[in-house]
């Protein structure tokens, strides 16, 4: 299924997140610092804004349809919190302290699985649940938040 215009930019950002996740999953001692720094730069540059847009615009748009206790919504919010928690831990660690390679690999798997879940499960459900006018309004709201459709 072709991704709706309303969600296209979020999906494009997911592609960037998957690149970062892949570097984390494949980390070795020689690449740990660069992978960690790339992840932190991603979170500062677009990851946090992406999470905020999903939490304040995307998920509320379907909360009434799916329900507040929907497992896909709960999983998304839980994983956002865990990724943020791990990012904060990495940010506050001394920069010269070597990163735990297994911790970085686990973070990469979490980020990768999170993105795949949204792309394969949550986004298709949203596109199916909302009609074209609702999707257009969702895209406009994302645009106002700085998540503009990629055209």
Image (cartoon, helix red, strand yellow):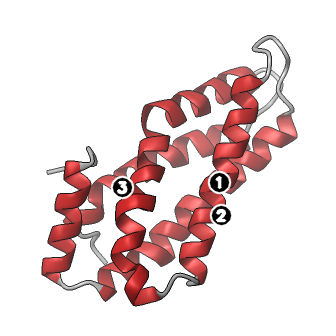
CA separation in Å, label 1 and label 3: 18 Å
Give the residue number, with chain letter if any, for mark 2: 78
The percent position of residue 80, horizontal first and vertical second, equals 60, 55
Q: Is residue 28 above or below residue 54?
A: above
Tell me if I can see residue 60 in this picture: yes
For this rendering, which residue is in front, 45 or 100? Answer: 45
CA separation in Å, label 3 and label 2: 18 Å
Which type of secondary structure does the marked residue at label 1 adopt?
Answer: helix
Which residue: 30% across, 63% down? 7
**Labels 1, 3: front one:** 1
Which residue: 45% across, 60% down? 55
The percent position of residue 86, horizontal first and vertical second, equals 73, 42
Q: Marks 2 and 1: CB-CB under 8 Å?
A: yes
The tag on residue 34 is none
Q: Is residue 19 above or below residue 124?
A: above
Among the 4 quarters of the image, the one containing residue 28: top right
Which type of secondary structure does the marked residue at label 2 adopt?
Answer: helix
Give the residue number, with chain letter if any, for mark 3: 10
For this rendering, which residue is in front, 79 or 38? Answer: 79
Among the 4 quarters of the image, the one containing residue 65: bottom left
Give the residue number, with chain letter if any, for mark 1: 81
For this rendering, which residue is in front, 112 or 122? Answer: 122
Which residue: 76% across, 34% down? 89
**Labels 3, 2: front one:** 2
Label 2 packing within 10 angstroms: few (<14), some (14-19), many (20+): few
Which type of secondary structure does the marked residue at label 3 adopt?
Answer: helix
């Amino acid at each position: 299924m072709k991704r709706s215009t309303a969600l296209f930019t979020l999906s494009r950002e997911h592609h960037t997140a998957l690149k970062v996740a892949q570097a984390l999953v494949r980390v070795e001692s020689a690449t740990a610092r660069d992978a960690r720094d790339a992840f932190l730069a991603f979170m500062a540059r677009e990851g946090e804004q992406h999470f905020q847009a999903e939490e304040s615009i995307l998920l509320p748009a379907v909360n009434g349809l799916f329900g507040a206790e929907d497992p896909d919504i709960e999983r998304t919010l839980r994983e956002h919190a865990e990724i943020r928690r791990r990012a904060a831990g990495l940010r506050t660690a001394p920069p010269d302290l070597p990163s735990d390679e297994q911790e970085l690999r686990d973070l990469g798997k979490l980020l990768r699985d999170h993105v795949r879940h949204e792309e394969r499960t949550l986004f298709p459900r949203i596109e199916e649940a909302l009609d074209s006018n609702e999707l257009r309004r969702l895209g406009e709201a994302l645009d106002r938040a700085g998540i503009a459709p990629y055209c």
